[in-house]
Amino acid sequence: MKKEDTVKLISREGFEFIIDKKAAMVSQTIRNMLTSPGSFAETEHGQVTFPEINTTILEKICQYFYWSLQYASGKETEFHIEPEITLELMMAANYLHT
Amino acid sequence: MGGACSRKRDQQVSEDSLHRGVSGRYSKSASSKWLGSSFSRGADAKQGKGKCPSLMELCIHRVCEDIDKYSTFSVLPRDISQQIFDELVCSQRLTDVSLEAFRDCALQDLNMGEYPGLDDNWMDVISSQGSSLLSLDLSGSDVTDPGLTNLKDCKNLQALNLNYCDQITDCGLENISGLTNLTSVSFRRNNTVTAQGMSVLSGLINLVKLDLERCPKIHGGMVHLKGLAKLESLNINCCNCITDSDMKPLADLTNLKGLQISSSKVTDYGVIFLKALEKLTLLNMEGCPVTAACLESLSGIVSTKLNCIEEIASVEYQLRPGNSNYYVFYKSYQCLQSLKVLNLGFNDITDAILVHLRGDLVFVYFFHLAGTFPASSVSTVGRLSYLESLNLDSCRIRDEGLIYLSGLHRLKSLELSDTEVGNNGIRHLSGLRNLESLNLSFTVVTDSGLKKLCGLSSLRSLNLDARQITDTGLAALTSLTGLTHLDLFGAKITDSGTSYLRYLNFITSNHLNSDYDFSGQLNLLIDFKNLRSLEICGGGLTDAGVKNIKDLTSLTLLNLSQNSHLTDKSLEVISGLTQLVSLNVSNSRVTNMGLQHLKQLKNLKSLTLESCKVTANDIRKLQSTELPNLVNYRPE
């Protein structure tokens, strides 16, 4: 995988998720960060830090990105959400416009 | 986090609950309190089919499923808890227990119109939203006067809907007297509120819209509205206590743009007081004892801002798509310059009015003259080349009158119900290529006349509810492939007639409404996979016939009453129609034993089995164990 095709998402605890740029762009917020004109650090290095999203939640979000791509390509499975993380996940989803 | 408000609030403010589609109150079956709204509720947020759900939607769906596990949402940003709330209301999962989780959530919109079970016990949490609350819809609830006490704290409330809250009296209304930010207040059909209760309105100086439709005791209360300088819309339709003297205080409301006084006792004398209302663009006087003389009073209403008025005209039309034919767009540039909507349906209007206004009517688009229109004036109508909608229901019009309509090429909707129009007349309609809706019910048109309609390719809705229409007539309609609504209620259609319906592949959403003499086979209906509503109440249907509807899985409303041969076997067939919201199999041989087949109909909200061998107790048992959504059943 070429480096420019991926992005690195970093959780509050510093855990790094390297995922396809295409997947990350499912989030409107991340899309804006990566494509906005001007030389933001995010655009240049292809990495975004989320000081307010913990690792568990960020992992779930990454799963959603890939699930969403699958869904769009016609594979309509169910996306499971654990009840105990739902509220926190919601706040992150709200922030990420996802 | 959560700083970005993803929710546009202004979309939430409802105009007569329009966001939920048809209100239960106005649905055909008046007894089905929640039925009308339930068709639109609850369909969202399911996974699968179409657009990929956002993570937010999935989370909200998840929360709603586990709603009992949450004790409070106050940690969430307001816009998120609002979305959860809306979804719970929409899916009817909200209860007085789950509502507790929304205490102090600073919600802005609590639109719970016609919500089942809503009573005073809910009001504490509702009022806890305090100064955040901007709009509150409690229509159709069991809230009483004490329930409104805490609303005093909701200082910023802008819209309050208490329609059909029949337990609220003058006393309860006192609680809203301090809510001076209110711009819209509505308490339709309140039998107890009097002129004294209306005195609280005098302090609501920001009021723009006031709706008191069907309040029978408010005579004398209009005097309290005198100071409401911002009031633009006042609806006192069907308040039969309203008389000429109630019009006098309205003269001060010079910002009034819409005034609805239909079915009141206002006469020509009362209309004189309305002279001063220069901004009036909508005046509904349907069923008032006024005569053409009242138009003289109104001819003084003049406005120079014609552009502005045109804009409002289109908005109003969109707001009331179902009612459009109740209004006459009255764009007369010389006489009634700013008045664009004037409803004179079922009034005692004679030729004189049309002669009087002939020159000014050129731009009229919508003409509602039902029951009032003298045949001798039909030539005047023929000159209204802009006309798109014409309602001549119950007018004294005959075949020779229709010749004048042949030039109305823009006509989209024509209502000729209950007229003396026959075959010779409707040939004059064959050139109206833009016609989308035609009502010929209770006319004397017969089968041979229907041939004249075969070129009306734009036709989507056709009403042929007349005894003399038979299979032969139906055969002439096979070229009308755009039809989505065909009403054959009283027509004599048999099995062989239904084969013609096969060609009408696009009868999708609405009615196929007939008392077919179905002795056995409904198999021709199989083509109508998208049919959502079906009523066959002709008495000739048997279990064997019902088998043929088992694939109509989109059906939400099914009425098979009056077919006395139907047995429990029919219910077994129906058990697969899981989308059903309303089912009626009254006057049949259905028994308690048959009820077990209905267990799978989880969406069922209304069940009617009158005059069957079924007891209320057994239905109640079924409701409590299997059908929690059932709110309306008979026998009860």
Image (cartoon, rainbow, N blue to C red):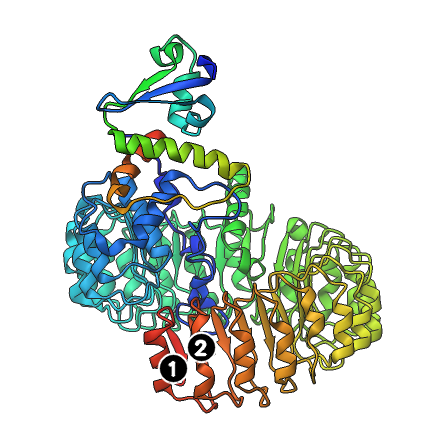
**What secondary structure is found at the residue carrying circle 1?**
helix
Residue drawn at (59%, 86%), measured in percent from left and top? B563
Marker disc for residue B619 = 1
Tell me the number on the disc at residue B607.
Answer: 2
Q: Give the residue type at disc 1.
A: Ile
Camera-side mark, 1 or 2: 1
Provide residue B34's location: percent of width, then percent of height.
Answer: 40, 67
Q: Earlier in the sequence, mark 1 or mark 2?
A: 2
Seen at 30% across and 73% down, the residue is B191
Q: Quadrant of residue B310?
A: top right
Question: Which x, y percent locates residue B59?
Answer: 34, 44
Image quadrant in which you'd find residue B96: bottom left
Q: Name the side, left or right, on which B527 lies relative to B173.
A: right
Which chain does the residue under circle 2 lie in? B
Q: Report the quarter where the N terminus of chain B lies.
A: top left
Residue at screen point 29% across, 41% down:
B80
